[in-house]
Structures are given as C-alpha cells and as structure tokens.
Image: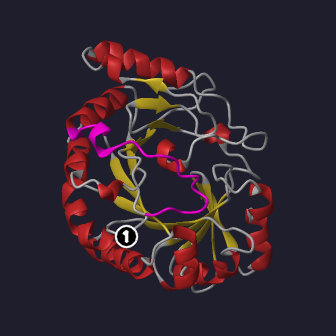
C-alpha cells in the first residue's frame, strides 16, 4: 500500500533480537532486552504475514546480531513459507556466518549484507571490541560458496578512526563479485561529534577519482566501479543526500512494535492485536499512513542505539 506521500511500502526490516556479540563504537548500543523476551518464530511469521497482506514483498532480518539466535533458520523458513514474500535477506556482522551460511541458504535465505568497517585486524578490534576479523572474512567466502547473492559489505567510515582503510575495502570490490557500500555515519552513537567524524560520499569520490558512476541508482545506493572491477562500490548518503522521497521501508522491532522511520523514536505496538487478523492488518495500514515525509538527522540525534532499532 501507499503511505500519505505516495510511496509504495514494500520492504520490511524485521529485528529479531537486540542482543549482539560485538560492541561497535558507532552503534550507540544500549541495554539489550533478554533472550526470553524475544518474539518466537511463530509470532514473527504471524506478524510478517499481516505485513505481506498490506503489500510487503521483501523482508530483511536484522538485529542486534540475528545469528545469536539459534532458531534463525526456523524464522527464515517461516517467512519464506508466506505467499507473497519475494525475497528474504539478512544483515549480519558475519562472525557466525561461516558455520551458518549453508543452513541459512537451505532455509530460504536469498542474500546477505555483512557489516565490516575495516580489513585491518587492529582497527577491527578497536571498532568492535573483538578479535573476529578472520571469522568475518571466512563468513564472506562461505556465503559466496553456498550461493547467497547478492553479497554486500556495509562499512561506516570515521575520520581518524578507520577512514584510512577505505582503499582496502574498495579493493574487495575490485577483486570479488560483491558490493562494498559506504554508509555515512548517522547520529546514533555516544560519540557526541558525529559531524566531525563523518566521511561523506563526496569525500570518498574525491579521494578515489577512478570510481565512475553506474546507472541507474539501485535503491538507496548509488553504485560506482573502476576499470577491471569484479564488484561495485556503493555510496549511501542519508545525511548529505537524503533519499527519503523514495523510501519504501518500515521496521518491525524485536519487541513487536513498528517503527515507521529510523530517524524518530516513535514506535507503535502490534502484539495487542495478535488475536484478530483483520484488526492487526488495519493497525499496520494506519501505521504506514503515519510514516513521516523524511528523517531529520541533520537537526537531532535519533535516541536509541542501532541494536534496538534494527538498522
């Protein structure tokens, strides 16, 4: 269905947990809800089915870190059993991906996004608080081997922290058939100086002038490549080039509430309506109509950490 601004809402991001096995510096991680409070696979399937009845076609599983749930394959299989779900994707930090990729593919997962902000071991440890880089790179290789496609690497650059590693990340796209996407730092962290740390898309293009645009833009990302590249480099610029006018997504949080826009704390509960399918669908329709015209990251912080909002 369309929201009040004529946007067709077809993309649902489903946060299945607030828990995470890393503690990335920009995430603004807050106290996580306990495992016992997380929605069951059956409840997630029931909620997603109601969203699909309202026009959702693509579902992305997010967290926290989704792979901390040992029933993730059951969740994915349940979602893929819903008629009308065209694709099911996963966003992960990749730490457990090598051991899980085959089972995820068999459960019905189509594609994977891997959060990786540096290919340097020391910088990675500083950013995440863990020495897990080798496991993440192994997960990337295994995802490719089992046929999860497309594979996208998401990176957030921060000046003086990991910005000097942009070239090494771009080299992944040169060598491998993957997309490496740079996402501008959003105001979720406890850093307090997001603007000073932020590396903009234009700064990346200035630093790497061999990158040439590929048309057309693909969703929220504008893609680029250099001569001989096997993959692509994407720029996602929520701060300097807002793409809200084309936003087609809505978020189901791990507590069963719905967040129409990542840029606001406002969320609406759905669990009280689980016993009545028609009432549940009507509530979703009304929430979609409440989706704002755009975020206001340039004027505020978004309050909650990414582990609570689902990214």
Residue at image location 37% in from the left, 30% down from the top: 51
Residue 38 forms part of the magenta stretch: yes
Q: Is residue 58 visible?
A: yes
Which quadrant of the figure has residue 143? Answer: bottom left
Residue 191 is left or right of residue 73, and the answer is right
Q: Is residue 5 above or below residue 92?
A: above
Residue at image location 52% in from the left, 84% down from the top: 121
**Tag 1 residue:** 95
Where does residue 176 sit, x and y in percent of width and height?
Answer: 46, 81
Q: Residues within 10 Å of mark 1 (few under 14, many from 20)?
A: many
Q: Is residue 12 above or below residue 256?
A: below
- Between 159 and 190, the one lying in front of the other is 190
Residue 70 is left or right of residue 237, and the answer is left
Where does residue 287 sit, x and y in percent of width and height?
Answer: 50, 22
Residue 91 forms part of the magenta stretch: no
Where does residue 164 sit, x and y in percent of width and height?
Answer: 70, 81
Residue 305 is left or right of residue 134, and the answer is right
Where does residue 112 sit, x and y in percent of width and height?
Answer: 39, 62
- Between 21 and 199, the one lying in front of the other is 21
Which quadrant of the figure has residue 156? Answer: bottom right
Residue at image location 65% in from the left, 78% down from the top: 166
- Between 112 and 232, the one lying in front of the other is 112
Badge 1 element: loop
In magenta, the rendered stretch is: 22-41
């Amino acid at each position: 269905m369309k929201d009040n601004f004529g946007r067709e809402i077809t993309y649902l991001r489903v946060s299945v947990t607030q828990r995470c096995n890393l503690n990335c510096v920009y995430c603004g991680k807050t106290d996580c809800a306990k495992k016992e409070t997380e929605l069951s696979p059956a409840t997630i399937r029931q909620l997603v089915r109601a969203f699909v009845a309202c026009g959702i076609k693509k579902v992305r599983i997010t967290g926290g870190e989704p792979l901390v749930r040992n029933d993730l394959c059951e969740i994915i299989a349940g979602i893929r059993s819903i008629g009308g779900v065209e694709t099911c994707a996963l966003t992960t930090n990749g730490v457990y991906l090598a051991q899980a990729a085959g089972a995820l593919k068999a459960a019905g997962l189509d594609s994977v996004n891997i959060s990786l902000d540096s290919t340097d071991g020391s910088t990675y440890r500083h950013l995440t608080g863990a020495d897990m880089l080798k496991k993440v790179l192994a997960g990337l290789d295994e995802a490719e081997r089992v046929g999860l496609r497309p594979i996208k690497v998401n990176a957030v650059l921060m000046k003086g922290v990991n910005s000097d590693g942009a070239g090494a990340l771009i080299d992944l796209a040169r060598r491998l058939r993957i997309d490496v996407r740079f996402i501008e730092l959003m105001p979720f962290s406890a850093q307090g100086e997001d603007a000073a740390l932020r590396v903009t898309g234009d700064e990346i293009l200035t630093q790497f002038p061999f990158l040439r645009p590929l048309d057309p833009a693909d969703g929220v990302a504008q893609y680029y490549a250099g001569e001989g590249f096997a993959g692509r480099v994407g720029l996602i610029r929520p701060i300097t080039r807002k793409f809200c006018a084309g936003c087609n997504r809505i978020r189901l949080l791990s507590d069963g509430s719905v967040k129409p826009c990542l840029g606001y704390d406002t969320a609406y509960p759905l669990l009280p309506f689980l016993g009545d399918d028609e009432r549940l669908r009507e509530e979703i329709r009304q929430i979609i109509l409440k989706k704002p015209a755009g975020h206001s990251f340039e004027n505020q912080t978004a309050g909650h950490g990414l582990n609570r909002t689902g990214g």
